[in-house]
Amino acid sequence: MTAVDGALPPLSPSPAELPGTSALLVDDSGRYLLHLRDANKPIWRPGQWGLPGGGAEPGETPAEAIARELLEETGLTVPDLTPFLLVDTVDAGGALTDRCLVHVGTLNTPAHEIPLYEGIQLRWTSFAETAYMTLDPGTAAVLREHQRQPRPHLGPAGVPRTVRVHESRKVRAQSIVGAHLVLVRDGAVLLGKRHPDSDYAPSVWHVPAGHREAGESALACVVRETAEETGLVVTADDLALVHTVDMCHPGSPFPRVQLFFAAGRWHGEPRVPEPDRCTEWRWWPLDALPEPLVGYTRAALTAIAAGESYTSLGWPE
């Protein structure tokens, strides 16, 4: 929900008072240049469409900050930027959680000719098209205000109108769920050596595992990932949850819940159907695990051997 306030709060170039600046760039046909942010990163509104911009650095004025941010993100220099709107985001209790000064300017450069150094994509977008996009709430409010009143209206101190974006309720924490298979034969556990070009844990040993897909249960994920990674056949009926690792993952805005399932039986012998992801599978004695081994996997296997069902990693004491 948004509301436009009549009172204008004091505007300061201090990062503590003005943590954000952004640019509402409009072409001659009335389209907006929107920026798709990276997902799964500890940034503001990850994975959502927003406006180019960022935080002010110490000593910068808002005008200097947005000029620098545009140059760093897109290589653009837009000479006619004017303060347009001040966006205050408040939580369910009314406390200010973010403030951003939005500048408006004109640009007619095709998106494919604009270099992009941060984020995923730049796109010229009509207002009607935004109904089918995941916009961050502040950007959605800015576009609605621009449609209603496109000309900047500045107060006596050069401060624009304020739009207040209310978080209607506290955002519930989201977690990434990983599903893992613990396969033990004659006192040895099955581990695969990840490919050296893997984005995560290259050349490190790990159990068969993956992230569940949309609409997929953790059990179904284990069945699918096991078949894809090892060629082995397991069924959900033969799986039992034996351990949970609850992780505060460094560098990610989302915690991770890693579920470890043991299989009572399976069919086939392990092979390497995905050589671009795993170079070999090997049975390792539980009392002689290899190095390097994914850290949370080692913690889980150690805890399982001790009969423990839960491990907490990375959370504050």
Image: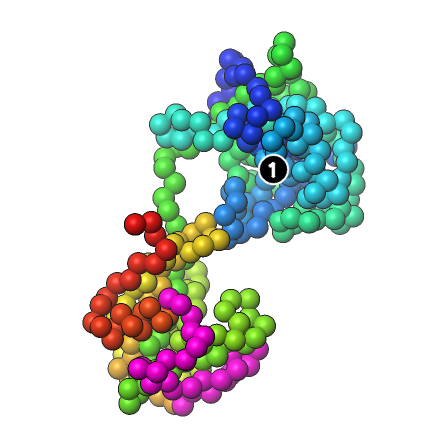
- Location of residue 269 in the rendering, given as x and y in whole percent from the top left corner: 40, 90
Task: Single out the residue that lies furthest toward the top.
Answer: 156
Task: Single out the residue that lies furthest toward the left.
Answer: 307
Q: Residue 22, located in which quarter of the rendered image?
A: top right
Tell me where the magenta segment starts and ends, as one range.
269-296
Q: Quadrant of the N terminus?
A: top left
Q: Tell me, yes or no, whether the highlighted magenta stretch contains residue 280.
A: yes
Q: Is residue 53 left or right of residue 253?
A: right
Amino acid under disc 1? Gly
Q: Residue 268, located in which quarter of the rendered image?
A: bottom left
Q: Residue drawn at (50%, 48%), measured in percent from left and top?
A: 42
What secondary structure characterizes most of the magenta part? loop
Q: Residue drawn at (23%, 66%), measured in percent from left and top?
A: 309
Say above or below: 214 vs 63: below
Say above or below: 156 vs 86: above
Q: Tell me, yes or no, whether the highlighted magenta stretch contains residue 258.
A: no
Q: Which residue is mark 1?
A: 54
